[in-house]
Image: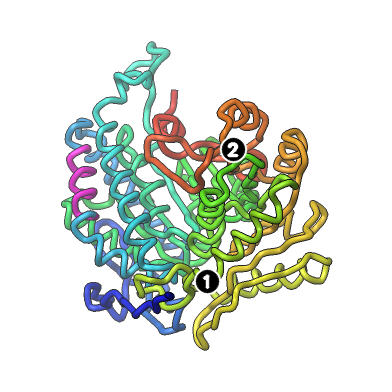
Amino acid sequence: MAFEYAPAPESRAVVDIAPSYGLFIDGEFTEAADGKVFKTVSPSTEEVLSEVAQAGEADVDRAVRAARKAFATWSALPGSERAKYLFRIARIIQERSRELAVLETLDNGKPIKETRDADLPLVAAHFFYYAGWADKLDHAGFGRRTTNGHSGATRVPRRGRTGSSRGNFPLLMLGVEDRPRRWRRATQSSSSPAETTPLSALFFADVCRQAGLPRGVVNILPGYGDAGAALVAHPDVNKVAFTGSTAVGKEIARTVAGTSKKLTLELGGKGANIVFDDAPIDQAVEGIVTGIFFNQGQVCCAGSRLLVQESVHDELLDALKRRLGTLRLGDPLDKNTDIGAINSAEQLARITALADRGEAEGAERWSPACELPTSGYWFAPTLFTNVTQAHTIARDEIFGPVLSVLTFRTPDEAVAKANNTQYGLSAGIWTEKGSRILAVAGKLRAGVIWSNTFNKFDPTSPFGGYKESGFGREGGRHGLEAYLDV
């Protein structure tokens, strides 16, 4: 007997969204110098959530100067004292997690069960993890900071840094990039959140004030590409961290080329999820669904290419289609929802165009029966079969709930197809043979490789890619070094 789901909406009343927000500079919210503002809307309803100040070049300069000024105070604190702020922020995030989860769902469009059960716990975990590092850098191979030039092991901070992030995981990206760079050897920051999802960054500014963080250590500058470009080009910024598209990453690399700025880039991906004939089918299906439909496929490391061994192709595809038929698409605040809204109208247009192109190039398109809401930005979960490596949908990052299915016969063919991409961020391997996992993983050119799982993250583990997926690592001990000078 089949049971119908009853709606289980999370209350919007737990979060109080103001009608307008300013920039967060030197510990205070302030208007943009030129008075410009923009509106942020809910992707699921197209409802205007708030009006936000739009940062310009003058605001960027003001924020960088505030950060430089804060450096004198912040750098004088011992690591144990800086750690206290980190622990305090982590605890406040946990205490306000319900509020922040609802806010993130409203502003981003992703299901509440993802923001509640995945994003917010991981944000807090990152802050807790790096709080433990703050007073241990001298004991972990990073050397002591000295006033003379005689210690070959000396590391000193990159004093001014900037970060700019994508709108798919707004608060998580802020946490992943910001928490280590502020607490490692006295670095202070100015960040530019994605223009489509600025609210969680602004709420994080309030968390910093609640934690008593010294003024100017954190500055938040919502705005468009010109604000991010001004941050990158500012002469007093020493370190740039960017999460976003490969095209913008290349532009940033050209900007900092020939300067002394350090740069880390976490860019696009076209992850291969490889299923061998001895893999547990039901477990693999769950991993495939998580790999491509989590956050509507708007994940840089999404498993958007499914490589299936020919002998189990039909069985796996049948099981996958049955599973997709059970996914619920709709109100992101409903705790039963599996597939939420696409982040923006622009991204929806891109996904639609690429999916239409895949069909025009001869791939076979399939989606489960589902009714799309009449307002908001929605795209049904989609499979493409009869895909070749020449198809655009097998080469380009779609950044949406679209899965391309290819086949292989031998492990060597699987590796060759998985590596046949300009990207190199993630991959997955599904097999019961541990020896096969190790053999295949050693040949894959991807920064993160999962075995019999997908999209699992831990703050202790470094994350990053190869080729056009960027360079540098975030997370773990490896993520510390980019913010220090020898």
Could you tell me which quadrant the C terminus lies in? Answer: top left
Quarter holding the N terminus is bottom left
The answer to whether the residue labelled 2 contacts the one labelled 1, judged by CB atoms less than 8 Å apart, is no
Where on the picture, by quarter, is residue 42? bottom left
Q: Secondary structure at mark 1?
A: loop
Write down the residue under mark 2: 431
Q: Which residue is mark 1?
A: 342
Give the residue drawn at x 38%, y 69%: 105
Residue 454 lies left or right of residue 220; in this view the side is right
Residue 84: in magenta span:
yes
Q: Say which quarter of the image contains residue 359.
A: bottom right
Residue 143 vertical position relative to residue 310 in the rendered view, above or below: above
Residue 401 within the segment the image draws in magenta: no
Residue 184 in picture, x, y percent from top left: 33, 34
Name the amino acid type tagged 2. Answer: Thr
Check residue 3 in the rendering and tell me which mark sits there, or answer none: none
Left or right position of 385 against 397: right
Helix, strand or loop for disc 2 = loop
Q: Is residue 418 above or below residue 42?
A: above
Q: Which residues are magenta?
A: 83-93
Q: Residue at x 66, y 42 (%)?
A: 277
Q: Nearer the viewer, residue 456 or 229?
A: 456
Give me the residue at 49% from left, 48% from top.
Answer: 455
> Looking at the image, can residue 300 be seen?
no
Report, in whole angstroms, how far the alpha carbon at label 2 lies from the one at label 1.
32 Å
Label 1 neighbour load within 10 Å: few <14, some 14-19, many 20+: many
Amino acid type of disc 1? Ile
Mark in front: 2 vs 1: 2
